[in-house]
Amino acid sequence: QVQLVESGGGLVQAGGSLVLSCAASRSILSFNIMGWYRQAPGKQRELVAQFLYGGHINYADSVKGRFTISRDNAKNTLTLQMNSLKSEDTAVYYCCVVSGPYDYWGQGTQVTVSS
């Protein structure tokens, strides 16, 4: 079992920045995949950014150049730096990790970008 707790969401004006953090209850070194997803009202959950096995990083086209995913193995945290935020970035953001055949999700944190 893994518990994931996201933090850092909030209300920001367009063009602003936010940093989301995800704290895991155990070592993140064992996870095959770690990433951030988001779900806007009335839309399906979508990938934002993720670390894949071997350290490769994958970003959604819509956030490339604006968002940066990073990890701190010593603190067991995953971070999403979000810059140049747009109204279309408004969503609930979820942290997700994959360990073997299982995936675990945080409770989500709301990000609202006002135009």
Image (cartoon, grey):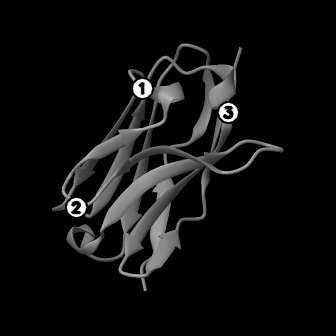
In terms of secondary structure, where does tag 2 sit?
loop
Q: Mark 1 to mark 3: distance in Å? A: 16 Å
Residue 4's disc is none
The answer to whether residue 85 is above or below residue 32 is above
Kindly identify the amino acid type of the residue bearing the numbered disc 3: Thr
Q: Nearer the viewer, mark 1 or mark 3?
A: 1
Residue 67 percent across, percent down from the top left: 41, 30
Residue 57 percent across, percent down from the top left: 30, 44
Q: Which residue is mark 3?
A: 90
Kindly identify the amino acid type of the residue bearing the numbered disc 1: Lys
Task: First in sequence, mark 1 or 3: give its number.
Answer: 1
Left or right relative to 42: residue 44: left
Q: Residues within 10 Å of mark 1 (few under 14, many from 20)?
A: few
Dot 3 and dot 2 residues touching (CB under 8 Å): no
Q: Which residue is mark 1?
A: 64
Q: Which residue is mark 2?
A: 75
In terms of secondary structure, where does tag 3 sit?
loop
Kindly identify the amino acid type of the residue bearing the numbered disc 2: Lys
